[in-house]
Image: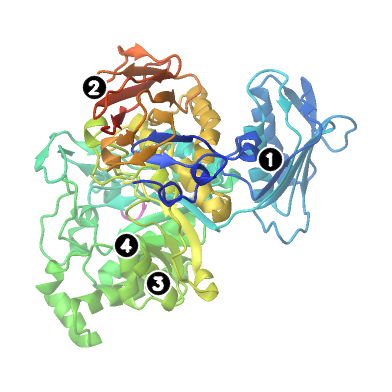
Amino acid sequence: MISNAVATGRGPASRAAMVTVMLFFGSGVAQLNVTAAQAAQPAIVPLPQHMTVAGPSFTVPVLLPILARDRDEREIATFVAATLASRGVHTTLVARANGPVIRLSEGLHDSRLGVEGYRLDVDSSGVSIGANAGAGLFYGAQTLDQLLPVGNAPVVPGVHIVDWPRFRWRGIHLDVSRHFFGLGVVERYIDVAARYKLNIFHWHLTDDQGWRFPVPRYPRLTTVGGCREGSQVGGEGSTQTDGQRYCGAYTAQQIRDVVAFARRRYVTIVPEIEMPGHSVEALAAYPWLGCGTGPYRVRELWGISSQIFCPTEPTFHFIDAVLAEVARLFPGPYIHIGGDEVPKEAWATSPAVAALRHRERLHTLDAVQGYFTRRVERIARKYGRRIVGWDEILGSSVTSSAVVMAWHGEDAARKAAHHANSVVMCPDPPLYFDAYQGKPDDEPLAIGGLTTTEMVYTYEPIPGGWTGSQSQSMLGVQANLWTEYVPTASHLFYMLLPRALALAEVAWTPRALKNYDGFTRRLAPQLAHFQREGVNFRVPQVTYRLEDASVSFGEQQTEQNAIVLTTDSPAPRISLREIVPNATIHLSRDGSFPSKQSQRYSRPFTLALQPGASRRIGAVAVLPDRRTSAPSYLIVRRNPL
């Protein structure tokens, strides 16, 4: 698709002073140019609310005091010290200091900042980070980390930043049921999120394919429900499995460790225990939880089991014990109870459900689900927790304190707001990170669909036409990463990055300040950071720049990673660009598939085109470790005379 600002003449290319059209093309999408002022700004993600680059810079000495007094200040000082140590700077924590210093100050009492905003100032005397609360100090420290260049004795540009988030809920989700990830991976996942000011980690702990959460009263949940006898191989619809036993579960101490890790990064964990559907793994452990006689098996294929919790008193006693343990291990205010995709065939033939319907005057099976969900909400409230659920819980007459995750999009959000429920936008698409990021032939196996970084970045969470009162219902935004087709940590971060950085800017930065081309410029040092840290990411595709006085846009297929342009020029001039700083570009000019072995691109070139002729150019980016981007293509056609 063509960016609207380009297609309708509202972008920079429409200015009368411009003689040539200069646009970048990649993944079949035209990108907006950045202004000179934007290009001069430090490369911070997410972009701050207010940032002025002015005044003298600060040359960091090799020994630098950090001024911190209270507990939060001292805790943030440890992050700042680690950041500086990686650049060869030694620090010392002090309560008073003269000369060059980093000052951390909690308790500004600035109403604009809330609990997560901050002020950051850099001049020749040092760095000052001020906030109303510890979270703001932490986010100011993350911004400082991005301001610091790599290398010894770094020089920090003089800046004045006043910053706070657009949304309160800035979430990222991880499914550990389909594929289990250990403590180190989970903590790195949280650390990446926190670096970019995401503050909610939605931990999907149970599903048909595995129960990962320990409940001492019910040990078979993890010893039986946490194991399956095989895992699906092949894409959607496959009925084949690998026949290999697959197990995984966390201990209570491991969960406490993750909670503490997240707390130090001001990340709230929202644990999810799926119910009443997506629960056959619990039935495999304790068959009396189901409406039938069994036997039940932990599901080996992806997708949904038709066997679900039976709404009986023993089941509710079980759920009470589970949620009590959830509340004991997770101090946050929320428990996610799922509530989506509930097949009700087992309820339809159950004498227990028939008796319940008669007793409670429940005329439909949907009403039975409503009864079930309201019972669970009362249990959660007993433990001081608000429930969160997928938007199907709106049919269950939950109270207005329930948080609704609108994965079906704007209609679900409008319905939730109408019922005075808080809303988190997480629509599929574009905020499902299990989708392909380009042409499926060029990507690892995924569940299907398309969610590019640009699709994430250009998503607007507030539905069109919402009033101010409706907007008050909007808690924020979240992306979900389901792991049916994500078996390894390397693959996990490939699916997360760089899309999570686009999500961070959607969640934090005001809509009016967003600019995708500016974002891609600021993305470069972030990807370099991940290279240094050994974190995998999807290498962005090569983009093309064409300078020509007469360009018309043909049909473009984003998923095919190609763009078709038509020109009058007999020799259009083309340059190529890759976001990752140390990548090389390899180029094919004869229409063949580009690879690491293709000609290395070094400088712009012209194409000789006869009237009516066309040329196809392909390119890939290659990192020093030989990781390669998906190919992208430019097809240039010359108009007939």
What distance separates the C-alpha of mark 3 from that of mark 4? 11 Å
Identify the amino acid type marked 4: His
The numbered mark, 3 or 2, whose residue comes first in the sequence reads 3
- Are dots 3 and 1 in contact, CB under 8 Å? no
Residue under pointer 3 = 414
Label 2 vs 1, first from the N-terminus: 1
Residue 216 lies, in percent from the top left, at: 37, 52
Identify whether 276 is placed above or below 241.
below
- Give 482 or 163, whichever is nearer the viewer: 163
Residue type, mark 2 in image: Gly
Q: Is residue 589 above or below residue 192?
A: above
> What is the quadrant of residue 15 in the picture?
top right
Distance in Å between CA atoms under marks 3 and 1: 39 Å
Between the C-alphas of marks 2 and 4, the distance is: 41 Å
Of the two numbered discs 2 and 4 on the same chain, state the one appearing first in sequence: 4
Q: Which mark is in front, 3 or 2?
A: 2
Mark 1: secondary structure: helix
